[in-house]
Structures are given as structure tokens and as C-alpha cells.
Amino acid sequence: MTSKAKGSAGALAAVLGGAVTRERLHRAATREGRTDAALVKTLLAQALPTVEDLARAYREAGGSLRLDPSFVRLAPRAARLLDPELLRRERCVPVEIFEDLCILAVDASRAATAAEAVRVALSRDVLPVVADAETIDRVLADLPALPAAVRHGALPRRDSPVHARFRELVIEDAGADALPLREEAAR
């Protein structure tokens, strides 16, 4: 096997492994508090690609993928998994959501931030595809409003007097006191 074939196999393995960039490795090490580890320093000193390097390679391979307006529809699972305000803010539409991947129609000017925001929100990889801005705006205008707020806390109870007394004595463990004679006579 030639060294060029070995290099291409290693590059393919790096891409299949998630194309970890210098920035991703640094972020992961920072989260764990291990930026001073010898292994991390050694890997950062080598030729680990940056995000810009990967973007340049992708651009040279053909650039951005484009999507026909007929495909730009909100994925059914998107309403349950993503906040409509996030989609409006980032001007993007998830057209398909798989277990580990989201195909995201984006406006070209907001592609990078939209892909990052949706990737973080879904904890899935994102494939951004450029779509017509007017089509994206049309789909975003049809997004359902957020559901009405739900009151938190216990619902008011409508117990009979016997159940209310039982609740006080047994469930809430209130001290048992004698009933006044007036109430006893009224019953």
C-alpha cells in the first residue's frame, strides 16, 4: 500500500469518525477540564484541521447543496423537537429529522449559525441545504403558535366536607381536635 493510499484511508477514517476539528477537540477538553493533558496538547500541535479547512475542502468538492422549493416543508417531528422561535430566529426549516441526522433548509446568509443552533438543540448532526429565502419565510409564517401556558401547581380541590376532613386528618396529618358542639348538633 502506498503512502498516498494510507493517507487517504486515514483521512476517510477521520471523516467517518466525525471530522473532529481543532475547535471541537479544544471545546471537549475544556468541558472536561483537561486542556493541559499531554495527549490533547500533542494532538492540537499536529495537523488537526480547523473548521475553515473543512469548509474549504467542502467548497472545492462542490460547495453547498441546494434544495428545490417543493421539498421545503416542516418535518412532522420538528414541532415536537424544536422551538418555533429558534426556527424563526435562525430562518431555517427542518425538512427531515432522522435518529442521528437532521436535513435543514437554510437561508444562505444564516447557514452556519442555523446549522450550529439546530445541532445543539437536537444533539444530532445537521446537513444544511440552501433553499429560497421566500420559501423558507412562507413555511415559517405557517408555523403553529406555541401552546397556551399550563398552570403549574395543584388543581383546586372540590371535596365534600367528609373528604376534606379526612384529607386534613389522615393525608395532611393535621392534629385531631374535637368538633364543636354547635357543628355536631347541626349534622
Image: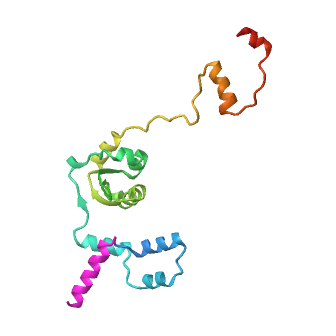
Q: Quadrant of the N terminus?
A: bottom left
Seen at 58% across and 33% down, the residue is 154
Q: Image quarter for residue 152?
A: top right
Vertical position of residue 186 compared to residue 162: above or below:
above
Disc tally is: 0
Q: Position of residue 119 (x, y in %)?
A: 38, 59
Seen at 23% across and 58% down, the residue is 66
Residue 172 belongs to magenta span: no
Left or right placement of residue 163 versus residue 34 in this view: right
Foreground of the two, 60 or 5: 5
Q: Position of residue 118 (x, y in %)?
A: 39, 56
List the single residue furthest toward the top.
Answer: 186
Foreground of the two, 135 or 166: 166
List the single residue furthest toward the bottom.
Answer: 2
Left or right placement of residue 132 versus residue 84 in this view: left
Per the rendered image, the range of residues in magenta is 1-18
Q: Image quarter for residue 46?
A: bottom left
Q: Position of residue 78 (x, y in %)?
A: 35, 47
Foreground of the two, 63 or 151: 151
Vertical position of residue 74 compared to residue 18: above or below:
above
Seen at 48% across and 83% down, the residue is 41
Q: Quadrant of the C terminus?
A: top right
Q: Main secondary structure of the magenta part?
A: helix
Q: How is the image coloured?
A: rainbow
Left or right placement of residue 95 versus residue 166 in this view: left
Seen at 77% across and 19% down, the residue is 179
Left or right placement of residue 156 versus residue 186 in this view: left
Q: Image quarter for residue 141?
A: top left
Q: Position of residue 28 (x, y in %)?
A: 47, 71
